[in-house]
Amino acid sequence: MLSMAAAAGCGKEPAPATAPRPRLVTFSPALTAIVFDMGLGEHVVGVTSYCVLPAGQDRPVVGDRVKLNAEAILSMSPDAVLIQQDAKAFSGVRKVNPKIRIEQFEIERLADITSAIGRIGRITGKEAVAEEFKKGFQARLAAVRAKAKGRARPRVLFVLGYDKPYVAADDNFIHDLIELAGGVNAGAEVVGR
């Protein structure tokens, strides 16, 4: 649903020196994709090593999903850091500069994406942009739903992981996407996942 443009150099220097306020560090690939898809990428001054940016876009890497580089984050002079993980990991950033807002998002279900779009609009002061993007996003979801309506519902097993594979259960966006596209998530029935 979100554009995952070809990986084009996520993590290259330098950060946009003239990024408009608010300056954002997006510490989540999903949040990075949403911000850029909304057309607000000019606000992003730092990303994780897992982020996939649109072609021609480069941003400094300030950590990965497991560890963050507080010094690198602070050097970007962000107004806000958008995260999906526990905010406690960012306590060092807050101690050094309590003015930096740590904005924690939960994006587990498809509906959470719509909520995140609205919240990003409020954070950036671009509520109208967010509302327009949200309408387009919902229209694309409705088009997929309409196309699947009345068709046979194939059973789909979505397997994740390499060393210890597991299946997508019924409590996440993968389940929502399978259902939206007209499938039945076979992983919803697996015990122990």
Image (cartoon, helix red, strand yellow):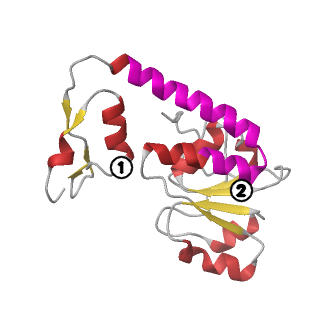
Instruction: Classify 104 as above or below 36.
Output: below
Instruction: Tell me, yes or no, whether the two marked residues, 1 and 2, touch with CB atoms within 8 Å.
Output: no
Taken as a whole, is the magenta stretch helix, strand or loop?
helix
Residue 159, by quadrant, is: top left
The first of marks 1 and 2 along the sequence is 2
In the displayed structure image, the side of residue 11 where residue 108 appears, left or right: left
Q: Nearer the viewer, residue 179 or 14?
A: 179
Instruction: Classify 62 as above or below 20.
Output: below
In the displayed structure image, the side of residue 56 where residue 68 appears, left or right: left
Q: Is residue 55 visible?
A: no
- Residue matched to label 1: 172
Q: Is residue 57 visible?
A: yes
Instruction: Classify 69 as above or below 149.
Output: below
Locate residue 152, reporting x and y percent. Answer: 21, 19
Look at the image and tell me in which quarter the C terminus lies. Answer: bottom left
Q: Total number of numbered labels?
A: 2
Locate residue 137, reporting x and y percent. Answer: 56, 31
Callout in the foreground (1, 2):
1
Residue 81 got which mark? none
Residue shown at the point (70%, 46%) measured from the top left: 121
- Residue matched to label 2: 24
